Image (cartoon, coloured by chain):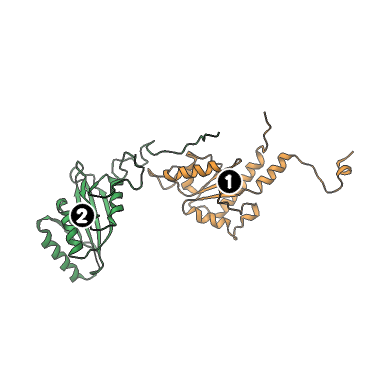
Amino acid sequence: MSLDRVMGEGYFTTTVDALTKWGRANSVWPMPMGLACCAIEMMAFAGPKYDAARFGSEVFRFSPRQSDVMIVAGWCTYKMSHAIRRVWDQMPDPKWCIAMGACASTGGMHRCYGVVQGVDNFLPVDYYISGCPPRPESIINAILKIQDKIKEQQSLKLDS
Amino acid sequence: MNIEIRDNLLQDIREFMGEDLLEMNLEYTHPLLRIKRDRLHDACRFLKNTLHFIYLNEIIGTDRFTSEDRFEVIYHLISLRNRQRLFLKVRVEEEYPVLPTVTDFWKSANWNEREVFDMFGIRFEGHPDLRRIFLPEDFKYYPLRKEFPLLGVPGSLEMPNTTPDHD
């Protein structure tokens, strides 16, 4: 007995895992952590010209509880690092992190005592964007890479 | 800038300070005066009350890294009436880095002096609230001194806890 006879036409079967991954990958809502000039390019990324809505990432959520990916845009001081980590801890799992620009990735030109030399010192960064500041296309690329990562990893864990 | 007004002002200052005016530099756009440390409070009162330098734009600290008179503090004053700027310099030695405050003449000196204290460790006697302004209060170093390493002292600034309690 085939499924068509049971359910009628217009149905197909899939796994819950694949469905979840499809849904997650196409609705990556960013948490904008704009710290410096990179944030301007991040706004351009969200604007109409680059149209992040094509990839399901147009909804910038200013509440960490509603967002999936944190874009750290700009240089981060030791003082700010505590606030960023606190926001990151409030984001619900699963979550991803993008270090945008040279400063967020490595400290960049801010090679001094007050700036954290790369946000990966206190955040699990998934994707680094190079550039100072990067073009909005680079952020789209990063979002697509994050989507690839979501599609590759297992979305559901069995209780063990 | 009116040269005549400037020269009159400088003449007044020269008469008031006498021997304590150590250096007068007119090579740059605005006059640069260096005075004795002991006369700073006196000179500021004269500049504000008599010559109408009512606006203190900024206070700058410098580390000259010399064996004597190591630090230099520069007061950037503006006279709105005469449209004249003036840089007033004082040198401080390393062993006793203390200057009289100028907050009683210019209220804006409050945060400026706190910043100089934060970065160079120069204390201002009589300041109403001399605390660090940028760095944490338990920070032990003065970062703009020349001997301070470029990337700071490892572990001196706290990093966030990366293993939260609920995990």
What's the CA distance linking mark 1 and mark 2? 53 Å
Viewer-proximal residue, A120 or B162? B162
Using residue B28 as the reference point, say whether residue A78 is left or right of it: right
Viewer-proximal residue, A100 or B88? B88
Which colour denotes chain B? green
Quadrant in the picture for the C terminus of chain B: top right
Residue B79 location (% of width, % of height) = 24, 65
Using residue A44 as the reference point, say whether residue B150 is left or right of it: left
Chain of the residue that carries numbered disc 1 in the rendered image:
A
- The residue lying at 61 percent from left, 53 percent from top is A59
Viewer-proximal residue, A144 or B99? B99
Specify the farthest residue to the front. Answer: B128
Residue B73: tell me if it is visible: yes
Q: Amino acid at mark 1?
A: Arg
**Residue located beneath label 1 in the image:** A65
Which chain is painted in orange?
A: A
Q: Secondary structure at mark 1?
A: helix
Residue B26: tell me if it is visible: no
Dot label at residue B89: 2
Of marks 1 and 2, the one in the foreground: 1
Q: Secondary structure at mark 2?
A: strand
Q: Amino acid at mark 2?
A: Lys
Using residue B113 as the reference point, say whether residue A80 is left or right of it: right
Quadrant in the picture for the N terminus of chain B: bottom left
Residue B25 location (% of width, % of height) = 18, 59
Number of numbered discs overlaid on the protein picture: 2
